[in-house]
Image (cartoon, rainbow, N blue to C red):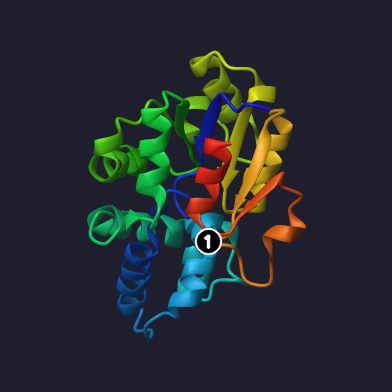
Amino acid sequence: MKIELFTFDLDGTLLDTAYDFLKAVNILREKYNLEEADFNEVRSRVSQGAGSLATYALSAENESPDQVEIYRQELLDIYEECCLDETRLFDGIEDVLNCLNENKIKWGIMTNKPRRFAEGIVDQKLSLFQTPFLICPDDVNARKPDPSGLIRALEISSVLASESIYIGDHQIDIQAGKSAGMTTGAAGYGYVPTNDHIDNWGADYNFNQPIDILKIIKS
């Protein structure tokens, strides 16, 4: 089967954003007189969203949802000030995107990251690749595992789901891709949650490093 459209998650799939999230978490913890966070714990939670990060940052597992939301907003306000400091492409992603562009294969991004953050980060960190589309929860009023963002990607690209692949580093990415009728790929080099493994997700492909995605493109 020839894949006509590659759609990617953002954090943990194209971009390594964990160090900027670590900085934001530590600023929040310092505000509440807490010690520095564990990097591996932060990294494993990035793809679970700001709520998970805020819960860990302030040990808020037993707090009310309303209080966790307050902490989440605090964290996001901090993150907005540092989200471009150390974020970078994963090694090998530049080759993947260049290969797609050189072969005139359609691609784009569908993320759970709000456009408030995602647009500026993509503009700054992926400007060389002229990203064809960026779809955020704001655009479809839904978050993964809801497939609405991927359905929008298919509509924008005029490609059948059966000729498309969605690649991400969390089980909800695989769920969303399957719900949209797409082939799925698990980015095992990304922010896989602690005590989870990509083998458990039922993806069509497991990519242990970005170069593995190149093999699919070239095949």
Tell me residue 178's x, y (percent). Answer: 72, 36
The residue carrying mark 1 is 189
Is residue 141 positioned above or below 118 on the image? Answer: above
Looking at the picture, tell me which residue is in the foreground, 166 or 145: 166
Q: Is 73 displayed left or right of 62 in the figure?
A: left
Image quadrant holding the N terminus, namely: top right
Q: Residue furthest top?
A: 158
Image quadrant holding the C terminus, namely: top right
Residue at image x 58%, y 29%? 150
Residue at image x 31%, y 75%? 31
Looking at the picture, tell me which residue is in the foreground, 142 or 83: 83
**What's the residue type where badge 1 is placed?**
Tyr
When asked about the image quadrant of residue 83, the answer is: bottom left
Residue at image x 23%, y 43%? 124
Secondary structure under tag 1 reads loop
Tell me residue 77's x, y (percent). Answer: 31, 55
Whether residue 4 is visible to the viewer of this picture, yes or no, is yes
